Every structure is written in structure tokens, then in C-alpha cells.
Image (tube, grey):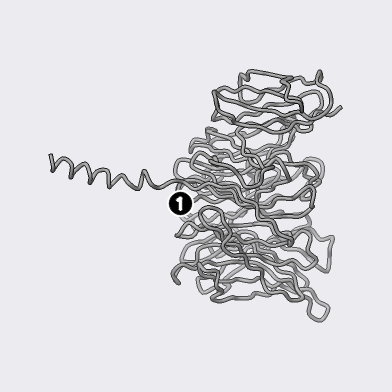
Amino acid sequence: MKLYHYFLFCYLFALLPLFTHAQSTFFKIFPSTDNSIGVKAIETPTNDIIIVGGNNFYSSVPRGIIMKINSNGNLIEKLILPEDDISSGLSTINNFTGLGIHYLLTGYKDTVIGGVSYTIIKMYIINESLNFISERSFWSGKELSIYPWQLKTGGNNSFYLLCTVDSTNQPTSPRQFCVLKFNNELDSISAYFSQGSSYHLIGDLLYDENQKKVDIFYLGPYITKSGSSMKVLELDSNLNYIASLSLPENIITEPSATCLTDTTYILTGVTHTMAIDRFISTYLMTYDHDSLKRQQIFNDPDTILYAGATPNTAINGESIFISGLYNIHPFEYPWQSTPSWIQVTRLDRSLNIISNNFYGGDAFYSPYSIIATADGGAFLTGFRYDLQTHLFDVFALKVDTNGAVTGEVENERTDIAGAILAPNPAHDKVSAIVGSQYTSADLLLYDLNGKQVFYKQLQNNRQIFDISGLKSGSYFYLFTSGNKKIGKGKLVKSR
């Protein structure tokens, strides 16, 4: 009997990490007066998160910011790049090997010398405690503004930095892009600059280890009436031109490419059809850029769904997490006057939709990046634009393996939901949008006195209802599935 107990103890001890390791989830807002936005993030070995960004929208002299939060979403430290007479910002953060636990940050500084405008590309190496170890500066050409956007690692400990390029002496010149290659000592090796009479709007950068090539995903040339065409520029590992190819039709913005296997990658972007204005499409692609499969992610046809900014896709084990921006009005961006939702869609590796979860609804939220986390979930950051104070704040959203946040949020106005109503405000019709993780749900509407005025048993994940018979005004809505509340909020019925 004692031997049995010993083996039982050993077995349970071996399983102990499975029982004691819980996934941390949170949805945090970090109020400030400096209009900070989160752009990119990375997870440390101790499960802290480092966020980089800036206060780019309102400040006359923007500053780069660095924030560190712990595994519960609590702020540990926030740094602002030193103040001087020039603008600055931070765009990327990546692991930096060879020095222990260190991180490589890229950003920019704008300056004017002798009446001539320059952009300085900045590279900083920091440690886990946010101490600056070293920095490098690279000057742009005369009267050029070069702003880093994406940094990816390549072969032989090299880095590829994708940047936008603007001409400061010719404001009407179309925007271009460049790719810069650096070695592990941060010495510049080679560069590629796009040229043309049309706009080239960058999206993402992907390094193909097998073929030793760099793929640049961009939009161009710009056509006013029919939108932009999606293309991929193939360069060899030294940034010499190979080819320029067209990608799947109808992608108009926010292209994001993420490696899935040695032979395939995931491409996510905003697409459109004649029936639905803008929504998300995710493609399974070969490295020769052939489309193998497509999954459409859309909700209400009267409400625009954008993919989050690049990167908008994170792959973690068997799950693919897609960040979305639901209820966006592109021409108001980023000062949108109506609220939006952060949408997190979870797919399996065959692109089947597993779940949809919604976060926000009380302000205008815009996700800027998503990363996989060590516990099987995902982390998102971006900004929250408050509709009353008109201030920008960083948000931090950590979801579990199911793409969900468990527990409450600190901001009592902010919702975590598996179902929402759209559009909101609504006129004669409204769509009930229920996450794919729920096979059945009920919708109830109450007036401000608590009287039930509407009830529907939902038959699928998106249904449109006629509410023209309701009086104009505000109503509370509630979604339930079984005995569980899966969504709640306020619906405004307009005339």
C-alpha cells in the first residue's frame, strides 16, 4: 500500500503544474494626460509585457513611450523618451540575442538642421528592467522622412526593417517605402527603396527561411474609385529585386502575414464585396503566394469591421487569433465620435472560426498589434479614445486560449461580451451578433423602467430584427445562452 501511495504521489506531483498554472487575463486602460498609444509589445520570460509607442496624435512634439506591466496587467513602470526640441516615437520591439535577456527597439526622431529636415532612425537596446544599454542612429537622406513600422529577424542573425518614406520638400509626392537590412551589431548592410508616381502603402514584412527571400506586402498603385490593389514584393536576402506579384483580390488595407509552417503562411486583411462594405478575410497561403483557403469574418452588413493594424494575426499552438476593430468610420479615424469594439476571433489551423469575443463599446478602440503569449493565449495593445475627454490612452488586453477574458474589468463602462447589437444607434433594424462559440442564445430588451419590451430566441449567430415598432430612446439589452449572461449593454433607438 505504501508503494502505491508513493507512485500516486509522484503521478500527482508530475501533474501539479497542469492544475496550478492558470492563464492570466485582463482588460486594462491606463489613463494619462499625454495621449499615449500602444503600438507593439513583447512578453518577457517572467510573463511581464513591455509595450512601446508614443503620444503621436495630439502632441505638437510627440514623444516615444515604454511601458512595462506584470502578468496581472498592473503597471510597473512607464518611461518617456527624453524631451528636447524634436519629435520622437517608438515603433517596434523584438528580442535581441547574444546579450542575455535584452530587447531591440526601433523608432525615429525628427529634426531640422540649417533649414533642412531630416529623420533619424533610432535603435535602442534595453534590458528587462528597461535600462538603456546602447543606441544607434541612422540619418535619412536630405529632406526625407523615414518612419520604422515592422522589424523581422532573418538568417545569419540579421534584421529587416520596413519603413514608410515621405518627401518633406515635396509634400504632394506619393508615399513610398524602404527596407533596411542590419546585422547583429546593428550595422547597416543594404537597403531597398521603392519608386514610382503612385502611392505605395506598406503592410507587413515576412522572411522566408527556405528560399532566403524577403516578402514585402503593400498596397499600390492607388486608384481612387476602385481602391488599392494588394501586392507582394519579393527581394533576396540582400534586398535585390526578384519579382512583384499580385495577391488575392479585394484586399484593400491592413495586410498582415504570419508564418504558419515551413511551406505556408497566414495572410489577413480588410476586404469588401458589393453586398458588404468592409470586413476581414484570412487566407492560407503558400510561400509562392498561391491561395489555398479563405475564411471570411464579417458581422452586420451595415457596420464596418476592420482588421487590426499590423500585426493583426497571432498563431499559438492550434489557435489563430485575429484582432479586429468593429464599428469603425474610416474617415473619422482616429477621432471617431461613436464607440467601437475590439473583436478577437479565434480560428483553428484549418481556418474554421471557433469563437468571437468583443471588448469595449464605451469609447473608440483601435488595436495596433497582437502577439502570442507563453500560456497559450494572446495579448493586444493599441489605444482608447475617450468620447468625453477626447484623450487617448493605452489599452492592454490579455485573453486566454479561448480568446476570452475571465473576471471583471476595472472600467465599469467597459464591457466584455460574447454577443452585441449593431449598428448602435439603430433605426428600423438591428443585428444580433453572437460569437461562434455559442450554439443558441436569447435576446431581451428592457426600457429604462426595467420593463421587458422585446424577446427573441436566436436561431444562428447573426440575425436581423425589425425594431421600427419601438419608440425612440434608450433600451437595455441582454444576451443569454443557457443560464449564462453573454452580453449586455445599452441600445439607442433613433428616429
Q: Of helix, strand and loop, which one carries label 1?
A: loop
Tell how many labels.
1
Task: Indicate the quadrant containing the N terminus: top left, top right, bottom left or bottom right.
Answer: top left
Q: Is residue 187 above or below residue 257?
A: below
Q: Is residue 339 above or below residue 479?
A: below
Q: Residue at x 59, y 65 (%)?
A: 77
Residue 301: x and y in percent read 73, 30
Task: Give, as a three-letter code, the residue at label 1.
Answer: Ala
Asked if residue 258 shows in the view, the reply is yes
Q: Nearer the viewer, residue 233 or 319?
A: 319
The residue carrying pointer 1 sits among few (fewer than 14), some (14 to 19) or many (20 or more) residues within 10 Å by Cα, namely some
Q: Residue at x 45, y 40 (%)?
A: 318
Asked if residue 251 shows in the view, the reply is no
Residue 181, by quadrant, is bottom right
Task: Indicate the quadrant containing the C terminus: top left, top right, bottom left or bottom right.
Answer: top right
Residue 156: x and y in percent read 46, 66
Q: Is residue 242 above or below residue 326?
A: below
Outermost residue toward the bottom?
114
Residue 405, by quadrant, is top right
Q: Nearer the viewer, residue 128 or 74?
A: 74
Residue 73: x and y in percent read 56, 53
Q: Nearer the viewer, residue 413 or 159?
A: 413
**Residue that label 1 marks:** 374
Q: Residue at x 70, y 30 (%)?
A: 421
Residue 307: x and y in percent read 65, 43
Q: Is residue 463 above or below residue 31?
A: above
Outermost residue toward the front?
449
In-image side of 377 versus 33 (left or right): left
